[in-house]
Amino acid sequence: MDWVAVGSFAAVASVLIALAGVYYSRGATIAQTKPSYPAIETFPITPMAGIANWYGTSFIVRNVEPVTWHIDHARVTMPVGTKLAIYGDLPKMPRENNWDEQHIDATGLGRVTLTNSRKLGIVLAPAGHHKGTAIMGENDRVSQSLYLFIPPRSEASSISIDLTLRSSAIPDRTFSRTVTHKIITASGSAT
């Protein structure tokens, strides 16, 4: 029997077993450091008054971890052809005075260039952190309104939106969460 070959085989096998142990423990460490996702509450999608094929919705995101979360992007995945906007993207009608709500100008919507994704730039403070007001400041809870153009040929009963998130606990890694919103028709029933 060639003892040198047996020794070499044993050495190679030991190295492979050690590497497998390192790989497994690294995976377990990453799994343990993965923070809990923020809680996301969605609201039904409702038609915008007087604007055909346009719908509005919103969602509330609440941080449940002692780390900061960033929600970088939203992307509509279903139905195909749906376009996404936030309030600042849309044309507004002039206000009569500073106290009036600024309504969306339906005549200018055709000039707006939209895609199925939108940068959001939401920052959620660590759980329990509140500084400023509900609209401005650092808070662990944020509300975001979205406006959607759904093609007239679509017969979808819901919309799927992928959110891209980052945690300050693992800054070089992104996470994806899909949220689903039910569509409420003009008659008030879910489709």
Image (cartoon, rainbow, N blue to C red):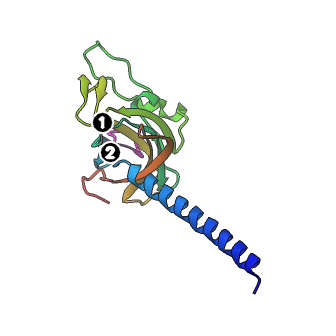
Q: Is residue 161 visible?
A: no
Q: CA distance from mark 1 to mark 2?
A: 13 Å
Mark earlier in primary sequence (1, 2): 2
Number of residues whose C-alpha sits closer than 10 Å to that of mark 1, classed few (under 14), some (14–19) or many (20 or more): some
Seen at 40% across and 49% down, the residue is: 33
Seen at 48% across and 59% down, the residue is: 25
Of 89 and 191, which appears nearest the observer?
A: 89
Apparent side of residue 189 relative to residue 31 in the rendered image (left or right): left
Q: Which residues are magenta?
A: 48-59
Where is residue 124 drawn, in percent x and y?
34, 34
Number of residues whose C-alpha sits closer than 10 Å to that of mark 2, classed few (under 14), some (14–19) or many (20 or more): many
Where is residue 180 drawn, in percent x and y?
36, 54
Circle on res. 143: 1
Apparent side of residue 147 relative to residue 19 in the rendered image (left or right): left
Of 174 and 86, which appears nearest the observer?
A: 174
Apparent side of residue 29 relative to residue 18 in the rendered image (left or right): left
Where is residue 163 drawn, in percent x and y?
43, 46
Was residue 102 drawn as part of the magenta stretch in this picture?
no
Seen at 70% across and 74% down, the residue is: 7
Give the secondary structure at mark 1: strand
Q: Label 2, on which residue?
A: 38
Q: Is residue 20 above or below residue 44?
A: below
Question: In the rendered image, which quarter contains the C terminus?
Answer: bottom left
Of 170 and 55, which appears nearest the observer?
A: 170
Q: Amino acid at mark 1?
A: Ser
Q: Is residue 155 above or below residue 62?
A: below
Q: Quadrant for residue 145, please give it.
A: top left
Q: Is residue 5 above or below residue 188?
A: below
